[in-house]
Image: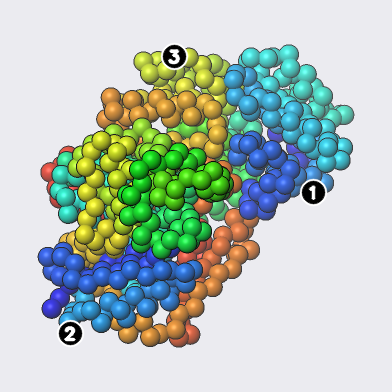
Amino acid sequence: MVGYLGIDVGSVSTNLVATNDHNEIIASTYLRTQGQPIQALQQGLVELQQQLPPGFKVLGVGTTGSGRTLAGVVVGADIVKNEITAHAVAAASLVPNVQTVLEIGGQDSKIIILRDGVVTDFGMNTVCAAGTGSFMDHQAERLGIPIAEFGNLALRATNPVRIAGRCTVFAESDMVHKQQMGHKLEDIVAGLCEALVRNYLNNVGKGKDILPPVVFQGGVAANAGIRTAFERALGITVYVPQYYGVMGAWGAAILAREKVRGGAGTTKFRGFQIARLDYQASSFECQGCPNQCEVISITSEGNILARWGDRCGRWESML
Amino acid sequence: MFAELGHEVIVPPPPSKHTLDLVTKYAPEFACIPFKILLGTYLEALALGADTIVSTGGIGPCRAGYYGELHRRILEDLGYNIRLFIIEPPLKRPGDFFRTIMSLVSNGFTWLRFPVILQRVWAKLNAIDRVERASHSIRPYEVVKGETSRVYESCLQELDKACSLQEIRDAERDALARLASIEQDRSRRPLKIGLIGEIYVVLEPFANHNVQILLEEMGALADRSIYLAEWSRGNAVVAGEKDVKRAARPFLSELVGGHGVNSIGQTVLYAQQGFDGVIQLAPFACIPEIVAKSILPRVSRELNIPVLTLFLDEQTGEGGIRTRVEAFVDLLIQRRNRREGQVVWSGI
């Protein structure tokens, strides 16, 4: 059996998928990055391989997410792609006439507008993470509710309270206040979902023409309370795909297939055994000029695999 | 120019992370990034022994006109005993301009030399602009990534050494020849992207995370709407830029300060010249650019040109800029693919 790998190394989660030759997902993993992107990636590869039939041949690999460059070096990627494009490709492959993609991940939230299968506009949160997965995680923990049950609890609300959702810290103060006033837990949780959606639509979604079909993906799409809040605010049905949590990785796999079939021919994949190798990442500030670039090098088993971060390329080109 | 007026000129190092570390301590948090980088640069120059600072003022409803005064007060509060001169635009406030210049002239200077000095400074500014423009037109085609930047840096050092008009002309000719000899792949079809926005963040690569070079190394031709000499001519010496303001008029006819009107007008001009897209560079919390940003979606829709806005301040992460710029370039490639009847995602 042959196929492709897609790897999405994000701030909070590291996701991997394997596809067959027709872009269909045949295996996937979803792990917490926990500040250790290389280890998470290696662990993910081990788990993915266990799900794959013996002798599965990798024809191409794509990486995406904020750790895409690092992951690309470690695995030997054929394409390293930003997460906006990767998510758009995945959504458009699943729902060809999709016009809006809502994506909320661990620390990023983005909106992608497509028309006739082409991205025409996008937006991404800039200075604030209120309204992302990390915030929901934190609040669930504070309230002692498993994150998986957070959304269903919100659905049981009869009278959602209004929570100030612009800032994570102030939203928390407001929630504490509402608890002390005696509001029911499900009404507070539902209020939080609505506040998050309001914040998203007023910041990331500001000025964007949100038309159906709307696809909602990223880890937060697991939360039925958020999905319902979106549907109520927009007045349109919001579609959550089966593989909502690994759409970025899937997009990377689809792009890897395009790339390898479109010209490259053979893959640069270094094989599943890289999960057992030792990798070291280190960085230093170059003192060669006033730019003081932060240069990153990746070493494996005593060999330098890659260096980047230097604007002039003097370290990069020394390999 | 000030060296020629009889002063020792201390050139502060280019802005760096160290500059920002300095200012986050002393600047008001809600001042914009140009204010902060300038203040940091002054502090670095003072540490190198400078006792006089020359800055520019300005007119119109943008906070930058008052920055010189605010800088002076912050530096005084920090205990520096310095002279800070604020040069006003000569056309708009001729009296102020010449009073400031007069007080900067040291003893033993003969006024007869003034036109000669001005001519040389002007020639050098223009030569630097032309060499820089050449580097931007070559980089998207370079075969060895980074080569154009390396050649360009060494050309700048040669230009810096040139003093007489003849030397400046020779250095420019050499620089252009060296740039032209860089190995290039002319079969590429670069996207054409216009860079607009507030002058300081458009001109200062440190403030905009080298976005022009980033785009060019991704294989796009990035046209910057502002060059220093050109702008000085248009705003300080002769009254120019009429066509930019005229182009903006259907969308924005009010004066909104800073470069707000220019941002609209230049987007219109880029659309008319068949550019693939426009990137607006704006200091975080800059009112003129916020006004422009709220009007740009209409310009974008009516003239069918995609616009990406990047707000910049000391909190802006390089990774975030890169992700957005890459996605924007992908978007432009998709549009071109569809226009040309090719597979939408090909070549991404």
Going by the numbered disc 3, the residue's amino acid type is Ser
Q: Secondary structure at mark 2?
A: loop
The mark found on residue A55 in the picture is: 2
Residues A233 and B179: in front is A233
The Cα–Cα distance between marks 1 and 2, rounded to whole angstroms, is 65 Å
On screen, residue A127 above or below A82? above
Q: Which residue is mark 1?
A: B47
How far from the left and from the top, in percent, is residue A314? 51, 65
Chain for numbered disc 3: B
Going by the numbered disc 2, the residue's amino acid type is Gly
**Residue A162: quarter of image:** top left
Which residue is located at x 47 percent, y 65 percent?
A308
Which residue is located at x 50 percent, y 74 percent?
A281
On screen, residue A296 above or below A1? above
Label 1: how many Cα within 10 Å (few below 14, some 14–19, many 20+): few
The Cα–Cα distance between marks 2 and 3, rounded to whole angstroms, is 67 Å
Is the residue under label 2 in contact with that under label 1 (CB below 8 Å)?
no
Which residue is located at x 47 percent, y 22 percent?
B261
Which residue is located at x 16 percent, y 50 percent?
A95
Q: Secondary structure at mark 3?
A: loop
Chain for numbered disc 2: A
Residues B284 and A168: in front is A168
Q: Nearer the viewer, mark 3 or mark 1?
A: 3
How far from the left and from the top, in percent, is residue B28? 69, 38
Q: Nearer the viewer, mark 1 or mark 2?
A: 2
Chain for numbered disc 1: B
Residues A13 and B325: in front is A13
Going by the numbered disc 1, the residue's amino acid type is Ala
How far from the left and from the top, in percent, is residue A207? 36, 32
How far from the left and from the top, in percent, is residue A212? 20, 39
On screen, residue B327 above or below B126? below
